[in-house]
């Protein structure tokens, strides 16, 4: 791994993209992006777009619960 990039959606850290010479691997930290974790992408923009669309499709209730958990932590 040469470089990693923070992936945020709406100001929320959802994971990182790690560059491995032939592309980027997504390392997710948000449960809503579990399906993307470990996937490979040719371009960083593809990682960001996939994270963005997946996050935005997540149920609204899951987002509210996540924010409530962070507030009480």
Image (cartoon, helix red, strand yellow):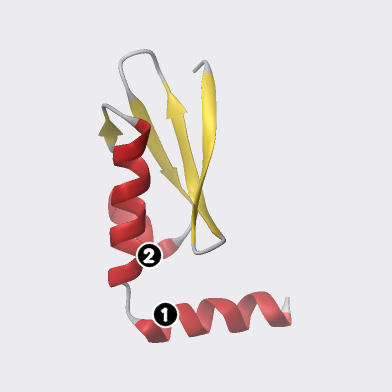
Compared with 46, 30 (above or below) is below
Residue 52 tag number: none
Residue 61, percent from left and from top: 40, 86
Q: Is residue 9 above or below residue 6?
A: below
- Image-quadrant location for residue 69: bottom right
Q: Residues within 10 Å of mark 2 (few under 14, many from 20)?
A: some
Task: Name which residue lies at 34% across and 41% down.
Answer: 47
* Secondary element at tag 1: helix
Labels 2 and 1 touching (C-beta < 8 A): yes
Q: Is residue 72 left or right of residue 23?
A: right
- Residue in the picture at 53% in, 22% down: 3
Q: Nearer the viewer, residue 7 or 36?
A: 7
- Asked if residue 64 is positioned above or below residue 10 in the image, the reply reads below
- At 37% from the left and 33% from the top, the residue drawn is 44
Residue identified by numbered label 2: 32
Please give the label number shown on residue 62: 1
Mark 2 to mark 1 CA distance (whole Å): 8 Å
Residue 29 is situated, as x and y percent measured from the top left of the image, at 50, 53
State which tag comes first along the sequence, 2 or 1: 2
Task: Examine the rendering and report whether any part of residue 38 can be seen.
Answer: no
Q: Does residue 72 appear to the left or right of 68 in the view shown? A: right
Expressed as whole percent of the image width and height from the top left, the position of residue 5 reads: 52, 35
Name which quarter of the figure residue 73 lies in: bottom right
Closer-to-camera residue (29/23): 23
Q: Position of residue 48 (x, y in %)?
A: 37, 45
């Amino acid at each position: 791994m040469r470089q990693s990039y923070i992936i945020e959606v709406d100001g929320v850290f959802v994971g990182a993209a790690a560059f491995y010479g032939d592309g980027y691997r997504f390392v997710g930290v948000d449960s809503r992006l579990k399906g993307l974790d470990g996937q490979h992408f040719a371009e960083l923009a593809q990682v960001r777009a996939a994270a963005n669309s997946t996050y935005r499709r997540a149920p609204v209730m899951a987002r509210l619960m996540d924010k409530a958990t962070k507030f009480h932590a």
